Image: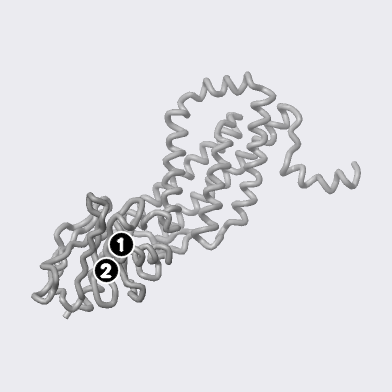
Amino acid sequence: MSQNDKSKGIFRNFWIEIIDLETAREAARYGGFVSGYLCLSYLIQSLFIYFTGNLLFSNTPPVDGIEFYITLVVTLAASLLFSYVCFDIFKRKKYGFVPYISIWLIIEIVYKFFLVSSKGIFISIIIFFLSLNAYRGWLGIRKFNKTEEVEIKKKRGWIKFIGIPISLILLSLIFFGVLTETSMLPSTYVQTGSELSQKEKNKLINHKIIDKNDNILFFYSEGIFSIIYGGQLITNDKVISYIMNEKKLLEIYEMPLNNVQEIVLETKGSFIEDSVYKIIGDENADYEYIVIVLSTEKNRNIDFINAIKKRMN
């Protein structure tokens, strides 16, 4: 063996040269190592969530209530999914899930890069590199043994109806979480002023919902795709509620905090329904009352209401 071959030895173990069906299968087997890592990773995250109530790779506050159970179920489901994929590759020598592993890792890397200050991203990049090797092997199998691939597809018809939809649901949940946490979609919970992005603050200013010098204490939007659809916020001296009407025009209602006489809970919210409050004004208020809706997630609705009570006369 030449010195050049020795220098390539370690690299060759991780990046297999695919020249026939045997080497293609050898490369594709790396998908088993990758899925085994993902299985263990999500299992550790599940245990971490269960015992501490915190997310392992997150800068957000601890999860609680329904968020706790949803996060726990999702991470456990992901762990079970990848344990099956690992078994499928090593024991059954089936490689149909290999492409989806690479897609999953891309989403995981994006999540860690944008949302959690790149915590754990280095190991994810290394694992992604291995998944690319497995993907090359999967392509090689298709190339060198199309007959076998056709047979695999016939035997695995159920995956189209069960396995793939489950994977897509899990991926969609992660993708939706990324969008809400990066302010590309409105947050699902009441935010503090410091958590609100400058982009969202500029939207509120440009639509004349707040003034440039207003200091936002708490904010929540019930909009699904845009905060302009509807929302409520509290500043140091006023509470504001706004909604876009059927004519696509904004209706903005505000009440100085020193004119708030009473706060009435009209509808107690749950994990699927926002709480509805009626903010009743005194004789000096411009409105008899204004209505606000607040998510109960993280109990931030209580913080919002307490902020108003603290500043009432």
Mark sitting earlier along the chain (2/1): 1
Question: Quick check: 258 left or right of 196?
Answer: left
Disc number placed over residue 85 in the picture, else none? none
Q: Nearer the viewer, residue 126 or 216?
A: 216
**Residue under the point 22% across and 73% down:** 308
Locate residue 67: give its quadrant: bottom left
Pointer 2 with pointer 1, Cβ within 8 A: yes
x%, y% of residue 210? 31, 69
Q: Is residue 305 visible?
A: yes
x%, y% of residue 168? 45, 39
- Quarter of the picture containing the N terminus is top right
Q: Secondary structure at mark 1?
A: strand
Q: Secondary structure at mark 2?
A: helix
Disc number placed over residue 304 in the picture, else none? 2
Q: Is residue 262 visible?
A: no
Which amino acid type is shown beneath numbered disc 2? Phe
**Residue under the point 36% across and 57% down:** 187
* Up/down of 59 relative to 2, above or below: below
Q: Nearer the viewer, residue 23 or 288?
A: 288
- Kindly report which numbered mark, 2 or 1, lies closer to the viewer in this rendering: 1
Disc number placed over residue 220 in the picture, else none? 1
Q: Nearer the viewer, residue 108 or 251?
A: 251
**Residue under the point 58% across and 36% down:** 98
Cα gap from disc 2 to disc 1, whole angstroms:
9 Å
Which amino acid type is shown beneath numbered disc 1? Tyr
Report crowding for label 1: few under 14, some 14 to 19, many 20 or more residues within 10 A (C-alpha).
many
Locate residue 29: give its quadrant: top right
x%, y% of residue 126? 64, 51
